[in-house]
Image (tube, rainbow, N blue to C red):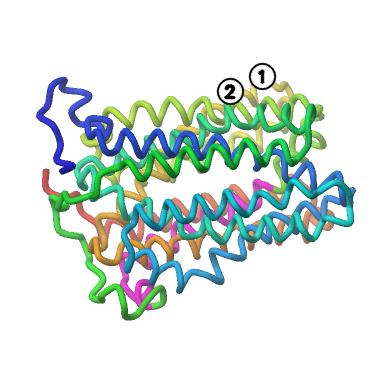
Amino acid sequence: MTSTPPATRRGFAGSAMAVPAFRRLWLAGLVSDTGDWLMFIALPLVVLRLTGSAVGTSFAFLLELAPPVLLAPVVARVTDRLPHRRVMVVAMLGQALTLLPLLLVHDRSELPLVYAVIVAQASFGAFFLPAKNALLPTLVGLDRANSANALVGLNNDLGRIIGGPLGGVLLAVGSIGTVALVDVASYVVAAALVLSVPHGRRVDPAPPASPIPIGPDTGGVLRALGDRATRHLVLVSTVASIAQGLFLVLFVFFVTDVIRGDAADVGLLRGVQAIGAIGAGLALGVLGARIDALRLALIGASTFTVITVLVWNASFVTHAVPVYAVLFATIGVPAVFMGAGLTSLLQQAVDGAVRGTAFAALGLGQAVGQAIGITVAGLLQEPLGILPLLEVQAAAYAITAVLAFVLLPRRFRSPPG
């Protein structure tokens, strides 16, 4: 059984951490995300080293986005037909196995092997996230969804702080094979922890706001997008992902070319983004049950826009790195709010039998959005310049906020307490 224990402490009782099954899942996510950041840091460096080209590195990012798009119909069917725990475990073990070819990579001739590993990793990963997001409400209930989603997002930031530097060190003192073996171990440990999670039997405490009127075997992703509530959430998330794709390409150039920072400044400003995110994740982990998911998403989207505009336009006033360290640390807070809010809203919007399909549709939109952003940044950076494109990136977040305010309040209401 995974029923929630009686409240013992007022703050903690509203947290997803009060559910033992969730604590195991959270620990598995922390181990897995730490391993992911090892590879996220090391692989692009290896590709850049082998190709000597930023184009080759961008191609690696685009390859990673292809599987969530191409496999979305399969992901939808699998995650709604099979137990979510089983899908997650198979996905992690698949990712572990597909890392082993990196042990053979030594020079440029093995570059196709690196690209193949990137595609295989992303293919198994495309199944993992929808299954996890569909599983969470069955463990903690919709009343703790904000808390659970924030704590799951917290793993990514903790993993960045731990795994990012470790990945660079392992690559420097060893090889990409060394990094791969450590990442394999993280997947195996995480899979074992997920296997220990009891089957979710808790019934959602509130009916979905706008259930998708299909069963898991009919309709798939396209039918899920035919549901207005799901389509609106996917649209908001997709536009935000376009902004994220632009950021992935332009961030380094902003630091090095606009504010005249060095490589150490790039690492510093990338790393401090986790500070605000960790603080927000911890706060929502305790207080998430008391906050309306819609309000959380709207606050996150609007605040994200304001801070993004401030970051890029501050360059007209100052190039002082400490100023940007504060701004980049702050921006992690609305990122967590928006991500947790949108995820909770989608969990509320669909029936448990088709949540996997809904999150496959969300992953499809996010991958398409990031691909658009990365492509636009790569093609237009030289003809338009960095700052004009960064203003476009800020405008994309502004559009995200407008869409959230216009579309989401019409479709979503808080579940009864």
160 over 112 or under it: above or below: above
Q: Residues within 10 Å of mark 1 (few under 14, many from 20)?
A: few
Residue labelled with disc 2: 326
Decide if residue 164 is on the left or right side of residue 85. Answer: right
* Residue 91 on the magenta segment: no
The residue positioned 75% from the left and 39% from the top of the image is 252
The residue positioned 67% from the left and 55% from the top of the image is 118
Residue 261 visible, this angle: no
**Label 2 with label 1: CB-CB less than 8 Å:** yes
Rendering coords of residue 295 (x, y %): 30, 44
Under circle 2, the secondary element is helix
Q: Quadrant of the C terminus?
A: top left
Q: Residues within 10 Å of mark 2 (few under 14, many from 20)?
A: some
Rendering coords of residue 8 (x, y %): 13, 21
Segment tinted magenta in the rendering = 223-248
* Residue 231 on the magenta segment: yes
317 over 45 or under it: above or below: above
Between 120 and 206, which is closer to the camera in this rendering?
A: 120
Under circle 1, the secondary element is helix
- The quadrant where residue 232 appears: bottom left
Residue flagged by tag 2: what amino acid is it? Answer: Val
Residue flagged by tag 1: what amino acid is it? Answer: Pro
Residue 249 visible, this angle: yes
Instruction: Please give the label number shown on residue 110.
Output: none
Secondary structure mostly seen in the magenta stretch = helix
Q: Quadrant of the N terminus?
A: top left
Residue labelled with disc 1: 322
